[in-house]
Image (cartoon, rainbow, N blue to C red):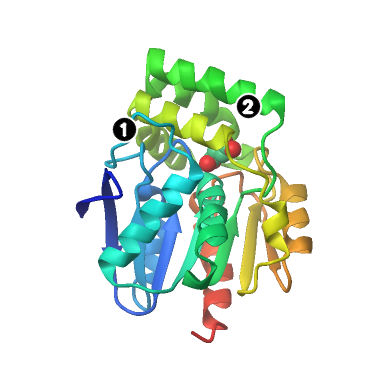
Amino acid sequence: MKRHLNGVELAWDEAGAGPPLVLLHAFPLDRRMWEPQVSAFSSHWRVITPDLRGAGESSWTDEDSFMERLAEDLAALLDYLGLARVVLGGLSMGGYAAFAFLRRYPARVSALVLADTRATADTDEGKKGRYEMAALAEREGAAAVAERMLPRLLGTTTHTRRPAVVSRVREMILANAGPGLAKLQRGMAARPDSRPLLGTIRCPTLALVGEEDVFTPLSDAEAMVQAIPGAKLVRLPEAGHLSNLEKPTAFNSALHDFLGQLRL
Ligand code: MLT
């Protein structure tokens, strides 16, 4: 589906019926990265997967795609769908956007899922890397971004044993537009430190992390979980940064247990 909302064309998929579960994708992918979760959870949940502005089939504006803007986009989408509160999940950049959403609309989140993400802002060196990546995306397009990021996006087990996952991820990256990716990189560079938010989170929270994640390693997940009251951490062996795609069965089983305990 596609609608003009909050100044951009926003594309999303919806599957199933039940309480709403919104999943926000990672960079430089799109909503299709949630396919294993859509198929597992749409029997009991209304699973909503947007393309964040600048990715997939969603458009972007002249401005960098700040996480606050992604949060406003989501609020506009939920208003359009008539949904006051949702279970909100995000992987990596999706997690940064989820933090921005929580800062602004805490009452709209009934439970939170943070996968392979971190609460900290970028270091100066990290920001510099993002500006370089943004320039590369604008100059050479998504293929150059794929070449640069793929080796680290997936864990060593996936690189050696799951060629189909590697090709699927490459294909998703290549479908993106260089300028949209550049806006998202600069938007991520500008994101604030979300650590002050963590202690204020009052909803049930699950964090998941691939043990082979080198982008947002276990230590990032542990630090988040220690700071969020009552949060639970699940480690996924033999999975890297895209843990939901690399170990979908283990990821889904942890998510299933968490969702099953919610009183919505
Ligand atoms: C992501 O997976 O969303 C990005 O790689 C995160 C990041 O660049 O910080």
Mark 2 / mark 1, whichever is N-terminal: 2
Ligand 1, image quadrant it occupies? top right
What residue is disc 2 on?
127
Task: Pick the residue in front: 186 or 13.
Answer: 186
- Residue 31: x and y in percent read 36, 49
Q: What type is the residue that disc 2 sits on?
A: Lys
Nearer mark to the viewer, of 2 and 1: 2
- Residue 61: x and y in percent read 32, 33
Query: In the picture, which quadrant includes the N terminus?
Result: bottom left
Q: In this picture, is 119 found above or below 61? A: below
Q: In this picture, is 68 found above or below 260? A: above
Q: Kindly tell me whether residue 160 is visible in this rendering.
A: no
Q: Kindly tell me whether residue 147 is visible in this rendering.
A: yes
Mark 2 and mark 1 in contact? Answer it, CB < 8 Å: no
Q: In this picture, is 7 found above or below 47? A: above
Task: Pick the residue in front: 254 or 48.
Answer: 48
Q: Residue at x 37, y 75 (%)?
A: 45
- Residue 122: x and y in percent read 67, 35
> Position of 218 compared to 52: left or right?
right
Task: Pick the residue in front: 69 or 250.
Answer: 69
> Position of 32 compared to 165: left or right?
left
Disc count in the image? Answer: 2
Label 1 residue near ligand 1, CB within 8 Å = no
Snapshot quadrant of residue 203: bottom right
Label 2, label 1: how far apart the Cα atoms are: 25 Å
Snapshot quadrant of residue 49: bottom left
Q: Which mark is residue 175?
A: 1
Determine the secondary structure under disc 1.
loop
- Residue 197: x and y in percent read 67, 58
Q: What type is the residue that disc 1 sits on?
A: Ala
